[in-house]
Image (cartoon, rainbow, N blue to C red):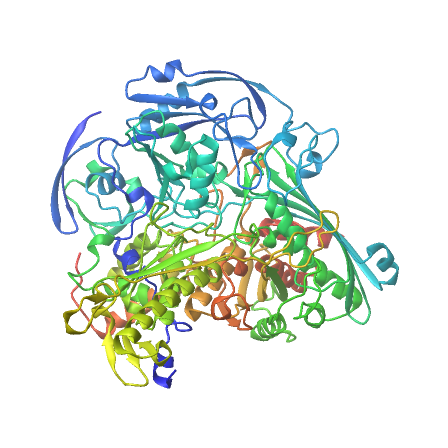
Amino acid sequence: MGMHSVVVTVNGVVECLEVPSNLTLLEMLRERLALTGTKNGCAAGECGACTVLMNGEPVNACMVLAVETDGAEIVTVEGLAHGEALDPLQQAFVEEGAVQCGFCTPGMLISARALLDRNPNPSETEIRQALLGNLCRCTGYTRIVRAVQRAASEAAENPREVVG
Amino acid sequence: MSEESRMASPVGRSVPRTDAGEKVTGAAQFTDDLQFGPGLLYGRLVRSPHPHARILRVDVSRALEMPGVKAVATGADTPGFIGLYLKDRHILCTDRVRYVGDPVAGVVAVSEEIAEEAARRVEVEYEPLPAVFDPLEGVHPDAPLLHPDLGQYEVVPFIFPQPGTNISNVFRVRKGDVEAAWPQCDAIVEATYRTPHIQHVPIEPHVAVARWDRTGQVTLWSSTQSPFAQRDLIAQSLGISQGDMRVIGPYVGGGFGSKAGVSMEALAVVLARKVPGHPVKVRLTREEEFFCAFVRQGLVARVKIGGTRDGKILALAVEYYWDAGAYTEYGVNITRAAGYSSTGPYTIPNVKTDSYCVYTNHPVGGPMRGFGMPEIHWSIEQSVDRLAEALGVDPLRFRLQNCVKGGDVIVTGMVMHPVGLQECIERAAEAVGWGRKEPASAPHKRRGKGIAACWKAPAMPPNAGSEAWVRFNEDATVSVGVGGQEIGQGAFTIAAQVAAETLGVPYEWVRVCHPVDTQYSPYEWQTVASRITWSMGNAVRAAAADARRQILELVARHWGESPDDLDIRDGEVVSFRSERSLALNKTVIYGLPLPDDQGWTGGPIIGRGRFMPTYVTGLDPETGQGERAVVHYTTGAQAVDLEVDLETGQVEVLRLAAFYDVGKAINPEQVVMQTEGGVVQGLSSALLEELRLHEGRPLNPSFVDYRIATAVDTPRQIIAGYVEVPQDDGPWGARGIGEHPMIATAPAIANALHDALGVRFDDLPLTAEKIYLALRAKEGR
């Protein structure tokens, strides 16, 4: 198996790694960097539990090879908070009861973050469309949608700099 | 209690979840997140490609030759049987395989890839045997026998296998006289209903890591609803002491029954035994998850029901044939629960029920949210609608008239406890505008409304118990030990609320100790049956009351007062008599000093509590009658307002209302959260889900081919609520609610579809294709 040098920024930290050709971004995050917040639900790009931001775009980390991330910026659920302060989305998920088992939550949060970064004031339909690739079996989605709406409206009231 | 402190009561308040912060930051640890270091090895399974075959030869030599392979285990390593109620399977198959996916051998290697490749090199020679793919075939006297040794299996006393057949349990009800009742009926309707196998689909697949040390001590980390049951059953099967086996259960990424009992976890233990000192991880792929873990049992239900023109249900005869799959070690009790609940939530004087658990060469049936109740209510609630129609009675009024009320003698002869089902039915109906015909949104659409009620009791052994302890940290924050698992349902939050309320400390002071660890955590039978708020809640309440009593006695002694004059308020001991107060943090670890430096009194406080129902009685095996079949029933109702597109068969649920009698909502928001999630899972099972099998082979084991509801598939509006008729044996009157929201959804949708289209659907799921074809067939007539 060929090995490759990768320099990748993960949650603002520059990581230099030697990775085999077949290592996925998901495996790199979970097994090499111990960033286990990103979950493995199907390893086939179907459930969305492993969604991370790659250069600001949501991707299924199980469908991206680690070598492809050379030079990229990755944000995982561990990188969403702003220092001590939770991201408004994280806060809204807590307050709206959008979390049950929590296994889909990291991917949901990232997909929602990607949505709000490109569309700060989405309609309910736009939110549901944006979360279409993130499966949840516990909540029935209602409160997740409401949490995204809440985070969006709070951000509109209290503008802040978007990190990425 | 003063008005002020009552306002701050944690019980009855929608406090935030204890685990939400961990779960939104990625801090929450699930089993696959635990780090085991470079000694970690991986296991993969060799699985049967045949639905039924004899194993003639297993040759592992080519696998063992592969670099990186550490060990291979086969059925020779697992001579013992395993099973919760009926020990009918080996951890690895010994002489025959009974479903596609049955594990025959397992490989341990340094990576999953090598283990997978080595598993392919294990040679297994099979002799295919005739197979059974339908429970009605399975009960036929000429059917191939799947478990010839059924008569020798160890079984609990309330399960009745029929040796020489494929029937692993039968439950009968004989109440009143149905034959005498039929002639008195003004209308009788009969139908046969089918529900397919479906999958729980937790987003976290099954995963287990096991390690044997060189002295024979075993540790198992698993995504499990049942750390204690896994310890017990795996230890029994391997012939080791439960005292030498430890199960650690981190957060569970969705259970719904699939992680109850033992399914794949024992495989990790068996593989790890081959490589002492090394942790061995086994995780199911999503593909395996669909058919190698438990599936929901299929059901063929024959229902005959009759009533009189004055709106009374007079008689019911049902036959249930459960498609229980290759092993029914857990499913036998679903058959029983279905039998003793076979009237649905109705009081019917004459009942004849035969519920059969039938072996087939399908994936292993097991518990799934509702434990047989969604399946039987699919038939009951449509039959009740059909009968109401035949009698010319409004289905809402019909339900209100016949539904169980406190004091009724129900199907098993048990006297029903106080129950708020009528109010649930009324409120659900009202929420969708029952009785008002409303127009569809387009000419090619039809609108309809439907309602369904339900009941479910915790289905468990009569003596399933819970333990809890309560102790303190130096700053008087509270550590609560429980053995119930946090699987998303909010169990830890409820435990914290119960402890805080009972002790008299702020909710924020309470920490629920996790992960649950059988070596240190209190006992809990299993996190199943919607029993945790009720049973574990009782145990936590008892433990907290015990701790509170110790504190009050200590301080009363110190102050020279009576404990009766003392209370704990917001974390301070206060005296009504002397108006003194003492902060708990001075007391709960170090005790209190005696006057004049004469020593100390008290010491670290530890409260202990337990709960076990002692009042569930046996039932007569011929009639199913007995004094108290179950601890209690949680009841409720759902109403649906929907639209169907005549051109596509697509269903859109506009409004879905769900109301349950929870006895007492310990956390009102969590009741609503369970309800919202449950109805969407119910809707998903109603409209989308079926594990399709062809001669035992799964055709759709992926998220592409087996769709579950996504964010765009939910009802436009969910109206979720509850009523509170207290339960005498529940904490503050609480009953369970975890499973119930899924039960009535599918029949409510089917009844609404009938209202919209005039078409009945006897088989799930209600796919657009099925509805479209039914409409074309109706036009053709």
Give the residue displayed 19% in from the left and 42% down from the top. A33
Residue closest to the eye, B235 or A92: B235
In percent of width and height, residue B12 lies at: 42, 73
A2 relative to A39 in the view: left or right:
left
B316 relative to B342 in the view: left or right:
right
Give the residue displayed 53% in from the left and 47% down from the top. B367
In percent of width and height, residue B92 lies at: 48, 27
Q: Total of numbered circles in the picture? A: 0
When the figure is inspected, residue B113 is found, relative to residue B420, above or below; the finding is: above
Q: Is residue B15 visible?
A: no
Give the residue displayed 75% in from the left and 47% down from the top. B622
In percent of width and height, residue B627 lies at: 68, 59
In percent of width and height, residue B303 lies at: 74, 52
Residue closest to the eye, B615 or B423: B615
Q: Residue B650's image quarter? A: bottom right
Q: Is residue B754 visible?
A: yes
When the figure is inspected, residue B187 is found, relative to residue B34, above or below; the finding is: below
A80 relative to B372 in the view: left or right:
left
Quarter occupied by the C terminus of chain A: bottom left
Residue closest to the eye, B408 or B24: B408
Quarter occupied by the N terminus of chain A: top left
